[in-house]
Image (cartoon, grey):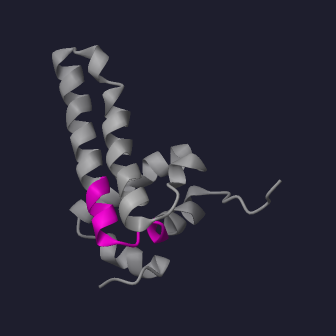
Amino acid sequence: MSTNRIASYKEFFPFYLREHSKRATRAFHYVGTLTALALFVGSIATQTWWLIPFYLVIGYGFAWYSHLFIEHNKPATFTYPLWSFIGDHHMLSLFLTRSLKKRLDEAGVLQA
């Protein structure tokens, strides 16, 4: 059994950012997360409950595609599902508030 598990979200988030080092990977995450959030809100607003599970399918579909074909690494979701879910939304909020660059720098992500 591995003892290298990350023990806190504070420790996880820099790791998460390093796993999303390419701008295109992050862009796919933003599109997936925003599309999924719109679907989720729309499903609730219209009471179309059967659409709610597609929130996860769309969000993770874009994310996993980017890890497979762009980043070439294993999605953090497979090891840290809850923190990864939170990390997607956290990274998006930092991007939308123009605060992401500082956090990428702090995590040691080299940016082109």
Estimate the x, y position of residue 56 in percent, counting from the top left: 37, 35
Q: Is 59 on the left or on the right of 39, as rendered?
A: right
Outermost right residue = 1
Find the residue positioned furthest to the front.
Answer: 69
Rendered location of residue 89, percent (x, y): 36, 51
**Residue 36 x %, y %:** 27, 38
Residue at horizontal 48 percent and vertical 66 percent from the top: 19
Query: In the image, is residue 111 part of the stretch drawn in magenta?
Result: no
Please tell me how many numbered marks the rendered image carries. 0
Say which residue appears at 24% left-offset and 21% top-offset.
44
Is 19 above or below relative to 28?
below
Which of the pair 23/42 is nearer the observer?
23
Span shown in magenta: 17-29
Which quarter of the rendered picture does the C terminus lie within? Answer: bottom left
Work out whether 12 lies above or below 44.
below
Identify whether 86 is placed above or below 19: above
Q: Position of residue 10 (x, y in %)?
A: 55, 62
Residue at (45% x, 46% y) in the render: 85
Please check the rendered image and state whether residue 25 is part of the magenta-colored stretch, yes or no. Answer: yes
- Magenta segment, principal secondary structure? helix
Q: Which residue shows up at 26% across the image and 30% down it?
A: 40
Residue 52, above or below 110:
above
